[in-house]
Image (spheres, grey):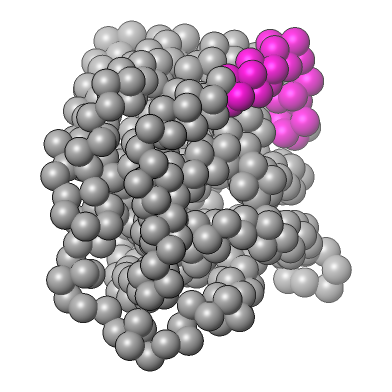
Amino acid sequence: MVLSSSAVTLMQLVDALVLSRHSQAAVAAMGPASLMVILVQGLLFGTSGYAGTFAAHHFGAKDESGLRRSAALGLRFSLRAGLAALLLAWPLAAIFRWSGHAPAVVADEISYASICLAGSFFPVLGAAFAGWLSGIGKPGLVTATSFLTLVVNAALAWGLVLGRGGLPHLGMAGAAWATVIAQALGCAIYAVLLVREGAFSVAADRRVEAAEFRRFLRLAFPLGLRISGEVFAWTAFLVFLGRIGQAELAASSIAFRINGAAFFPAMGLGQAAGVLVGQARGAGRDDDVPSIGWQATALCELWLAAMAAVFLAFPGTLVGWFAGSGPQAASTIHAGVVILRFVSFYCLFDAGNVVLGWALSSAGDTAWIARTFALFSAVFVACLVGVDRFAPGIAAEWSLATIFVAATALTWAVRFHRGSWRTARVVGESSLG
């Protein structure tokens, strides 16, 4: 699962490298536009992906019928979510017209966001099916599929963004189309794998009862809201940074891509811990959950500390790879060096943020996490508004971001330590607190 999440990192890095050869405006636009896409898709694939948690619990309980119903739940939600995203794609992308960014940046933001949002069905269904495969203990299939889609995305991005290999020169739109096509391919492969694993082999289990679907949404939707809420906070963060200047926005967008090299493998480790937590709870082994969470957190902390050391040691070199060679490259690199210092510090808190957040969600504690994170996000955005009005600057705004990450990590750690998740139920009656 770490390898699978690393494929996401590589995909983003490839996009950033290709776009840096296209234009500085595209580099600046990639950050806010991609966060807008994940803002919407995070709500949807965060919800659909919870089918994997249902699968892990049923797998631990050795309930084969429940396993098959978990796959049907993910499919049913994804069909509805994909249609809703298609209808909302262009109105949502048009929000960038009021961002205050440079006209060239706005045009690229709208182009990328509208295309990716219209194709949301593929990553949403892919998340449900990938989660199901991981839940039954076969993450290797997810890894292989992820790296295949990475190769396809890289080849298409190089061709469609820059007009190479006989493909049309589409610029920012080319990066979006490359992403959607690669996601569609991955979704098709997952569908074949689920059929092969017998996920849809019994007709009775393909029919989802309304009560079971409502229960799935009651548990899964708060997780989707938490993911979407987090992305909303970071999207607002980038929008405010863009008001400082294009170089600061480009540097922050690059920093997010570089941080992905640390974050996405950590997220894979968190997801793996979540699968183990779900399987343990499904089998009635609640006493195994604390050791799973804390050991995974410690391992994740070692990884993130090593990456933080790299960010501190080579900030100029790392940012320079993506800054291009335009007139603003030097300003972008200078701002990026400052930003990576903040990134290297908050990396140390992300282990608790990612791993313990996944562990709590997989245990069924999704409603509390969603409520708490909504409160933290509201405070974060309100503070950003104040800083933007009275003391705008990358140091002040990135300091707020670091405090935001640290506060959530410490809160998840306290919640997990207290064991409140023991009262939550994913399979059976629920008493979420």
Q: Please tell me which residue is depicted at 57% across the width and 37% down the height of the picture.
A: 269
Labels in figure, total = 0
Q: Is any part of residue 185 visible from this angle? A: yes
Residue 201 drawn at (x, y percent): 48, 86
Q: Which of 97 and 367 is in front in this view?
A: 367
Magenta highlight: main SS:
helix
Q: Inspect the magenta stretch and tell me whether residue 278 lies in it.
A: no
Q: In this view, does 55 lie above or below 354?
A: below
Residue 270 drawn at (x, y percent): 51, 37
Q: Is any part of residue 171 visible from this angle? A: no
Q: Please tell me which residue is depicted at 27% across the width and 53% down the height of the picture.
A: 426
Identify the magenta region.
299-324
Q: Please tell me which residue is depicted at 49% across the width and 57% down the height of the picture.
A: 135
Q: Nearer the viewer, residue 433 or 109?
A: 433
In the image: residue 2, left or right of residue 96: right
In the image: residue 176, left or right of residue 69: right
Q: Please tell me which residue is depicted at 54% across the width and 29% down the height of the picture.
A: 296
Residue 165 drawn at (x, y percent): 85, 68
Q: Which residue lies furthest to the right in this view?
A: 165
